[in-house]
Amino acid sequence: MIYRRSGHSGIQLPAFSLGLWHNFGGVDDFTVARDMVLRAFDNGICHFDLANNYGPPPGSAETNFGRILSGELKSHRDELFISSKAGHDMWEGVYGTGSSRKNIIASCDQSLQRTRLDYFDIFYSHRYDPTTPIEETMQALIDLVRQGKALYVGISKYPKAQQEQAYAILREAHVPCLLSQYRCSLFDQKAKHDNFDCAQSNGSGIICFSPLAQGILSGKYNKGIPEDSRAAKPTGFLQASQVTAERVEAARQLEEIANARHQTLAQMSLAWVLSDPRVTSVIIGTSSVNQLMTNISALDNLDFSEEELKIIDEIVQKPTISF
Ligand SMILES: NC(=O)c1ccc[n+]([C@@H]2O[C@H](COP(=O)([O-])OP(=O)(O)OC[C@H]3O[C@@H](n4cnc5c(N)ncnc54)[C@H](OP(=O)(O)O)[C@@H]3O)[C@@H](O)[C@H]2O)c1
């Protein structure tokens, strides 16, 4: 595993982190979930990314992770870097969503209980909530650190203006933002242009999610929608309507470049996200140990020639491709 420093901090993170958004919930096979977590850890992936609502049902990914943690990983807590987040819909009533102090503090307490942890290594505001003053949201994060429930804090999907505000408030309280989480893939380069420089100049690390556009950039949809894929599952967030003919055609063309590099399309797509030196870590999602191991092997070739980058750009820089 390769480790990269997260912004202006003492923390190093693995180039690949494992995300538990899909495939680790109550509807999934616990044995497979456990095997993926343990195999990831054995291969140097010490960062696991959670959120209160991951499942389904919401909360069950944290419960399952807590089970794995208190079993095989029990003696390894200090080798692990574990995140959770609050901000998306979680429980009934007006306090169960958004980024109020009430939601964030209660949510963190619930997540600690489910994961059976004493503290999170990093706790995020999962999304900017325009109905809550940003000062209130940031103060809640700061207080989680003061209360010993989180070592570091982060923001996820914050638009540029609020991203800058968040950094300033956190910095003033001497609880600097450790990580900024943004979606980034060959099919979605918006955050690269809008948010990465701002994060870097404010000393925040950058961690990217959905690097394979939820699987389209593995090439698995090139011959239609496989039965066991995310787009085919009723609980998957990837809609079949998002697997468009244009994206599949782009994936086919990209696959040819990947093969010429002796990589699978998934490996090349992951290598491409990591090839941006501003990126600290890429959060991968996997549904099998086989996918996990394939994806980790992307680290064998992270370099791109100018010619390759030019051809890749020509394929993906189209309005019909971008998410
Ligand atoms: N901050 C946020 O708001 C936010 C939002 C989204 C995600 N995230 C984080 O980012 C993590 C990753 O997101 P993601 O799951 O969307 O990532 P992704 O890498 O874009 O998609 C992962 C899916 O692609 C397929 N796949 C992966 N490797 C493959 C391979 N080698 N061959 C074939 N198919 C492969 C699998 O789907 P199949 O089920 O089809 O096999 C897998 O579940 C999440 O778990 C979460 O921790 C954060």
Image: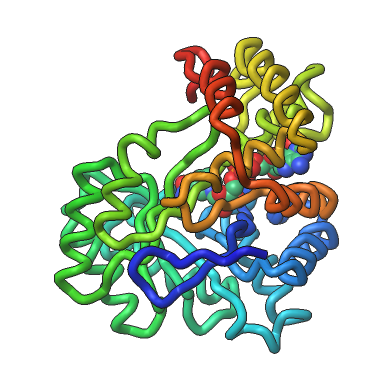
Instruction: State whether residue 106 is above or below residue 297.
Output: below
User: Which residue is drawn at the image coordinates 47% and 75% (left, top)?
Assistant: 121
Q: Which of 290 and 139 is in front in this view?
A: 290
Q: Which residue is drawn at 39% across and 38% down?
A: 192
Q: Which of 196 and 157 is in front in this view?
A: 196
Q: Quadrant of ligand 1?
A: top right
Q: Is residue 145 left or right of residue 72?
A: left
| Above-or-below relation of 253 to 199 | above
Q: In which quarter of the image is the N terminus?
A: bottom right
- Give the answer, above or below, for where 116 lies relative to 278: below
In the rendered view, does 36 fall on the left or right side of 127? right
Rendered position, 113 above or below 273: below
* The furthest residue to the front: 306
Q: Position of residue 227 (x, y in %)?
A: 83, 28
Q: Quadrant of residue 42?
A: bottom right
Q: Is residue 64 visible?
A: yes
Location of residue 195 by image quarter: top left
Q: Image check: 203 left or right of 312?
A: left
In the picture as drawn, the residue positioned furthest to the bottom comes out as 75
Residue 258 percent across, percent down from the top left = 72, 31
Query: Could you tell me residue 161's position as x and y percent?
Result: 19, 43
Quadrant housing residue 185: top right
* Residue at 67% across, 84% down: 76
Q: Nearer the viewer, residue 212 or 162?
A: 212
Residue 257 rendering spot, x and y as whole percentages: 70, 26
x 73%, y 64%: residue: 40
**Can residue 92 be seen by looking at this rendering?**
no
> How many labels, in total?
0
The image's colouring method is rainbow
Tell which of 154 and 277 is nearer to you.
277
